[in-house]
Amino acid sequence: MPAAGAGVRLGGEVPKALRELRGESLLAHAVKRAAAAPSVGLIVVAAPPQLLREVRELLAGVDAEVLVVAGGASRQESVAQALAVVPDGIEIVLVHDAARSLTPPELVESVITAVRAGHGAVIPVLPVVDTIKRVGPSDDVVATVDRSELRAVQTPQGFRREVLVKAHAEAGGEHTDDAGMVERLGLPVHCVPGSESALKITRPVDLIIAEALLAAAGEEIR
């Protein structure tokens, strides 16, 4: 779980993962929901290097085994550093953004189930509901994209461990999406239905939406 980003668009004086939602950090919300998935046995958090002690204390009460390591300068580096400490013998690895704090355990489990079924890489997706335009350098519309073939990608993304390790080893350049790195290897990426609750909290308005979701559904986020 990469959680070392500053979260400039969200604002505030603390890293995004430590911003609070209903009195609890976004990171704690994300970790607790991931830990509630029956198949999750270990969570590795890549935290801001200067806040390792604080993050460990923050997650001390989580009912799961949690390792906290120093994150890198980019999301890709943070995932690689977390992946490096995953113990031998663990064959399925998920990569999950702490900013998707309300992701339900059921979605986490469905990704794991799809990997167990034989897929090397799995992503949760939602249909794109907006009309999408391709725009040229002059700000004129070039084309309208057929949205029936488009999907918005969420996390957690699930992988056979050897697939994710190979993708990072051969990445070449910066990437913000682990499944995209797998695609560059020429390997298939399987899709499963995502969840409206797994929104990415990036802007101040996203915090308001997350608050509304919690207020409407309590802790039973689906």
Image (tube, rainbow, N blue to C red):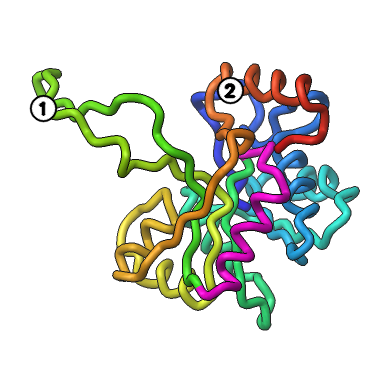
Q: Residue at x 42, y 74 (%)?
A: 166
Crowd band around label 2 with a 10 angstrom C-alpha radius: few (<14), some (14–19), many (20+)? some
Crowd band around label 1 with a 10 angstrom C-alpha radius: few (<14), some (14–19), many (20+)? few
At label 1, the amino acid type is Val
**N-terminal-most mark, 1 or 2:** 1
At label 2, the amino acid type is Asp
Image quadrant occupied by the C terminus? top right
Does the residue at mark 1 contact the one at mark 2 (Cβ under 8 Å)?
Answer: no
Name of the residue lying farthest toward the front:
148
Q: Position of residue 152 (x, y in %)?
A: 43, 40
Range shown magenta: 99-118
Residue bearing the label numbered 2 = 206
Q: Position of residue 172 (x, y in %)?
A: 31, 63
Q: Position of residue 3 (x, y in %)?
A: 62, 45
Q: Is residue 18 above or below residue 204?
A: below
Q: Is residue 174 magenta?
A: no
Name of the residue lying farthest toward the bottom:
89
Q: CA distance from mark 1 to mark 2?
A: 30 Å
Residue bearing the label numbered 1 = 142
Q: Position of residue 117 (x, y in %)?
A: 57, 73
Quarter location, residue 144: top left
- Number of the label disc, if any, that sits on residue 40: none
Between circles 1 and 2, the one closer to the viewer is 1
Q: Which one is nearer the viewer's eye here, 47 or 215?
A: 215
Q: Is residue 87 above or below residue 124?
A: below
Q: Which one is nearer the viewer's eye here, 75 or 209?
A: 209
**Main secondary structure type of the part rendered in magenta:** helix
Q: Residue at x 40, y 34 (%)?
A: 128
Q: Is residue 104 magenta?
A: yes
